[in-house]
Image (cartoon, rainbow, N blue to C red):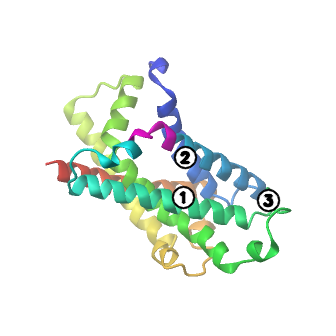
Amino acid sequence: MNYRSINRRMAVTALLPLLFVLTMSFHYIPKLLHEIIGVVWFLLAGVHLYQNRHWLKSLRQGKWNFRRALGTVIDILLIAVVLVTVFAGLGISNFLLKDIMPLEIQRSIVIHQYHVSLPYALLILCGLHWGLHFKGWLGQWQKVFDWKLSAVAKRTVVAALSLAALSAGIYASFLNRIGDRLLMKHIFATAATNEPAVIYVLLLCGTIGLYVLLGAALQRYLKA
C-alpha cells in the first residue's frame, strides 16, 4: 500500500461522500453534531470546487457534445442544490445560528421542507457526478492499494458490487420514499429511519451506488 500516492484532492473526494452520509444520518446523531458535520461538509465541497476550478475556466473553451453538456448540467444542478440545502439548514439552525437567524426564517415550513427534501436529490446528483468521473477516481486509488486482479476476478468483483448497489439502491428508494421527497411532500420519518443506524447508512450508500452505476454507464455509453 502506497500512502504517499494519496494527495489532497483524493482525500477531499473520499471524505465528501462519507461526511454526507453521516450528515444525512441525523436521526442517529446529536443535532449539534449534525449541524457541525454539515458545515464541515459544505466547506469541503467548497475546497473540492476550488481544487477543480479549471472546470469553470474551461466552460468557454473546447467543443461541446451531449456528454459534456450532460455533465455540466449535473454539476451546475449539484452546486445549486448544495447551496439551497445548506443555507436552508443554516436558516433553521437550532444551535450554531440560533441567536442570529430571525424567528420567521427559523420557523419557516418552506425552508424546513427544502432542507429535509433536497438532500435526497443530492444523493442522486452526487451519485451521477461521481459515476461520470468514477473511472479516473478508481484508477487513482488502484495505485494507492496496488490492486492486482485477474480479468476474471475483476469482472466478478465489479458484477457483485454492481448487483449489491443496484438491489440496495432500488430497495432504499422505496423505504426512503425518495419519489415523495423529490415532490417536496412533508415526510419526517420513513421505514428506512426505523431501521438500525448501520442498515440506514448502508441504504444511503446503496442509493448513491445506484446512481454511480448509472453515471458510469452513461459515461461508457456516451464515450463509445
Q: Earlier in the sequence, mark 3 or mark 1?
A: 1
Q: Quadrant of residue 190?
A: bottom right
Q: Quadrant of residue 134?
A: top left
Question: How far is mark 3 from mark 1, CA to CA?
Answer: 18 Å
Q: Residue furthest front?
A: 60
**CB of mark 1 within 8 Å of CB of mark 2?**
yes
Point out residue 4 in the picture as x, y percentages from the top left corner.
48, 18
Q: Mark 3 highlights which residue? A: 97
Point out residue 193 in the picture as x, y percentages from the top left corner.
61, 67
Name the amino acid type tagged 1: Val
Q: Mark 1 highlights which residue? A: 82
Residue in the image at 35% along x and 49% along y? 131
Q: Earlier in the sequence, mark 1 or mark 2?
A: 2
Q: How many residues crowd mark 1 within 10 Å: few (<14), some (14–19), many (20+)? A: many
Name the amino acid type tagged 3: Leu
Name the amino acid type tagged 2: Ala
Frontmost residue, 220 versus 48: 48
